[in-house]
């Protein structure tokens, strides 16, 4: 994955949440543009945990660094509406 491609996803207006799929089968959801920071060869995801079941045992709500080399593809994820309060 190229850094420029990821930056385009993060900077799109309006922002659309997306999911990163990695070579090991783990996925990460990016639900806000400030959650992700892209450098030349990696993306840092703030407050992240894997979205898919994985055996990594990753602790929730920590910063994750992912090498761009390991991102296989990106997909848009649907926005879930907030529950209404009666």
Image: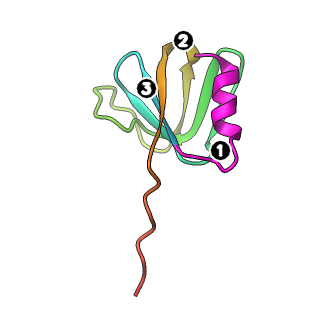
The answer to which of 55 and 9 lies nearer the viewer is: 9
Residue 6 in picture, x, y percent from top left: 63, 27
The numbered mark at residue 23 is: none
Q: Nearer the viewer, residue 16 or 54?
A: 16
Above or below 37: residue 34: below
In front: 36, or 3?
3
| Above-or-below relation of 12 to 84 | above
Position of residue 1 in the picture relative to residue 80 (left or right): right
> Mark 3 highlights which residue?
21
Q: What residue sits 64% from the left and 16% below the top?
A: 2
Give the quarter of the figure containing the N terminus: top right
Q: Earlier in the sequence, mark 1 or mark 2?
A: 1
Q: Earlier in the sequence, mark 2 or mark 3?
A: 3
Report whether 57 appears left or right of 71: left
Residue under pointer 1: 33
Crowd around label 1: few <14 · some 14–19 · many ≥20 (10 Å): some
Where's residue 43, x and y in %?
61, 26
Q: Is residue 56 magenta?
A: no
Q: Is residue 29 above or below residue 2?
A: below
Q: Which mark is residue 69?
A: 2
Residue stretch in magenta: 1-17
Q: Residues within 10 Å of mark 2 (few under 14, many from 20)?
A: few
Give whichever of discs 3 and 1 has the lower sequence position: 3
- Left or right: 66 in relation to 77: right
Give the residue displayed 43% in from the left and 21% down from the top: 22
Q: Is residue 7 magenta?
A: yes
- Horizontal and vertical percent for residue 67? 56, 16
């Amino acid at each position: 994955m190229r850094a420029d491609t990821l930056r385009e996803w993060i900077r799109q207006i309006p922002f659309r949440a997306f999911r990163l799929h990695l070579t090991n089968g783990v996925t990460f959801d990016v639900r806000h543009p400030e959650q992700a920071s892209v450098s030349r060869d990696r993306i840092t995801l703030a407050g992240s945990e894997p979205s898919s079941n994985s055996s990594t045992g990753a602790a929730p709500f920590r910063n994750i660094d992912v090498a761009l080399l390991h991102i296989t593809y990106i997909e848009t994820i649907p926005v879930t509406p907030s529950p209404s309060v009666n």
